[in-house]
């Protein structure tokens, strides 16, 4: 009889212990699930790409601003699902001196990649290449002061041969020199495969058509893509 009672007691105690362990296990699992559910999903950070230039960037003469190369690059970025927002800060007629004054206002927002496309109007006006270089350098300095980790891209330009061979050479050389000084990714010539080609330029023979802008986008994208 005593032996039977001991067996019942052991069985009851075992079931009670198992029940307690199961309850503890479920509680721990429920707590773990709850904690996992409470962890918010990481929000993807959108980075800014600032296109700072003149009428070539602004898309002068185009029927739709979305045909300008910064917008075409945004479309490419969106198609790849990359977290970047392109800001078109092109202003028709802008010189390096004007850009030096205008950049401060644009730097009120964070800039992660800065694409500098200025100097063409300086060249067409015969502005001293020393002055142009200093102005572009000052612009880059301001960008880096506000955004030390900003990646930099420089769009190289050329002037027509009618400006004289000496000026032509000096102007062309200032862009690689500036790019080297500030470790900027260089687009050797923004208008490569567009300049001087009739059907890719508007009637003024200076500003690209919508088809010409596609080639500008290609020229810039080849240099920009590795930075993204």
Image (tube, helix red, strand yellow):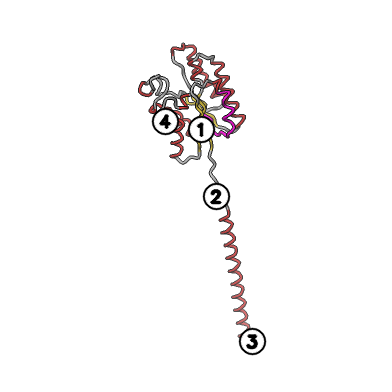
Which residue: 53% across, 14% down? 127
How packed is label 4: few (under 14 Cα within 10 Å), some, or many (20 or more)? few
Can you give x and y, in whole percent of width and height, for residue 17 in the image? 61, 73
Of the two numbered discs 4 and 3 in the rendering, the one whose residue sits closer to the viewer: 4
Secondary structure found at label 2? loop
Of the two numbered discs 2 and 4 in the rendering, the one whose residue sits closer to the viewer: 4
Which residue: 53% across, 35% down? 48
For mark 3, what is the residue? 2
Ranked by sequence position, the earlier of labels 3 and 2 is 3
For mark 2, what is the residue? 41
Compared to 60, does 13 lie above or below? Answer: below
Secondary structure found at label 4? loop
| Span colored in magenta | 99-115
Disc 1/disc 2 C-alpha distance (Å)? 27 Å
Direction left: furthest residue: 199
Compared to 178, does 146 lie above or below? Answer: below
For mark 4, what is the residue? 64
For mark 1, what is the residue? 87
Left or right: where 152 falls relative to 65: right
Which of 19/64 is in front?
64
Q: Quadrant of residue 103?
A: top right
């Amino acid at each position: 009889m005593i032996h039977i009672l001991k067996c019942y007691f052991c069985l009851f105690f075992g079931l009670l212990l198992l029940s307690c362990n199961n309850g503890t296990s479920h509680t721990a699992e429920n707590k773990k699930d709850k904690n996992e559910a409470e962890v918010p999903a990481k929000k993807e950070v959108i980075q800014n790409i600032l296109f700072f230039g003149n009428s070539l960037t602004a898309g002068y003469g185009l029927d739709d601003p979305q045909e300008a190369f910064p917008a075409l690059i945004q479309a490419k970025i969106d198609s790849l699902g990359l977290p970047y927002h392109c800001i078109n800060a092109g202003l028709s007629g802008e010189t390096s001196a004007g850009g030096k004054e205008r950049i401060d206002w644009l730097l009120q927002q964070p800039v992660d990649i800065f694409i500098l496309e200025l100097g063409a109007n300086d060249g067409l006006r015969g502005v001293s290449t020393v002055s142009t270089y200093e102005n572009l350098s000052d612009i880059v300095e301001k960008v880096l002061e506000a955004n030390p980790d900003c990646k930099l891209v420089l769009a190289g330009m050329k002037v027509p041969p009618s400006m004289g061979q000496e000026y032509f050479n000096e102007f062309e050389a200032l862009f690689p020199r500036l790019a080297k000084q500030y470790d900027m990714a260089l687009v050797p010539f923004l208008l490569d495969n567009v300049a001087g080609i009739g059907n890719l330029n508007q009637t003024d023979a200076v500003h690209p058509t919508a088809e010409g802008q596609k080639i500008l986008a290609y020229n810039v994208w080849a240099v920009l893509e590795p930075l993204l």
